[in-house]
Amino acid sequence: MNNYIALLRGINVGGHRVKMDVLRAHISALGHSHVWSFIASGNVGFSTEQDDPDELARAIEGRLARELGYEVATFLRTPAELAAVVGIDPDLPTGWDAKTASHYVLFLDAPASASLLSSLAELESDTDRFLAESLEVHWLTRGRMSESPLFAGGIGKVTNHVRATTRNMTSLTKLLAKAVSQ
């Protein structure tokens, strides 16, 4: 049995409301077992006999598009892959306060292109830093995301051509704990 965590983009944001029991039912209907969810922002864990994550993601995306009426980009990670992401603790730039700095992760479905990395490097400032790791980009910001000058769309201009979803490290740590306890 293979265990996966699906990070779904566009769940309970932008007017798209989905109850977690309904979301779990859609994942279960695909033949997956031990389906669970974590907070109402599109984090779903499940077990399956299938072992092709790309095929699984396409099946979930197809089902959700049909049932919800809009595209839901799906990013799958195993608990071990999520543990590796959570285990990354980049050094904060000099002068940043660890108590007020925030750590977000952009999950990608393909390794970050040179173009994306270059664009992110151009966005770095005294308040925002980026670190690319495999299929994720870690975004450190000096305060809350909403305090970053990139929040109002700067990051979106760079990532609008890239399939990605973002989670904060606090939620990811709790998500991993739940995945391990299942």
Image (cartoon, rainbow, N blue to C red):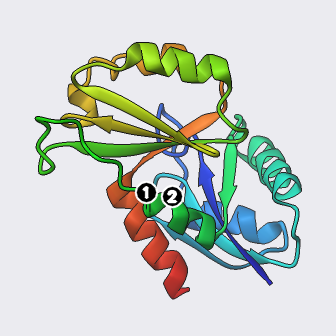
Which of the pair 92/64 is nearer the observer? 92
Name the image quarter holding residue 72.
Answer: top right
Q: Secondary structure at mark 1?
A: loop
Q: Are marks 1 and 2 in contact (CB under 8 Å)?
A: yes
Q: Secondary structure at mark 2?
A: helix
Say if 129 sits above or below 105 in the image: above
Q: Identify residue type, mark 2.
A: Val
Say if 132 sits above or below 115 in the image: below
Which of the pair 19/161 is nearer the observer? 161
Q: CA distance from mark 1 to mark 2?
A: 6 Å
Percent x, y of residue 147: 20, 27
Q: Is residue 161 visible?
A: no
Which quadrant is home to the C terminus? Answer: bottom right
Name the image quarter holding residue 69.
Answer: top right
For the point 85% across and 53% down, the residue is: 59
Name the image quarter holding residue 102.
Answer: top left
Q: Identify residue type, mark 1.
A: Ile
Percent x, y of residue 181: 50, 86
On residue 116, the disc is none
Which of the pair 66/81 is nearer the observer? 81
Q: Is residue 159 left or right of residue 31?
A: left
| Residue of label 1 | 88
Which quadrant is home to the N terminus? Answer: bottom right
Percent x, y of residue 100: 13, 44
Q: Is residue 110 visible?
A: yes
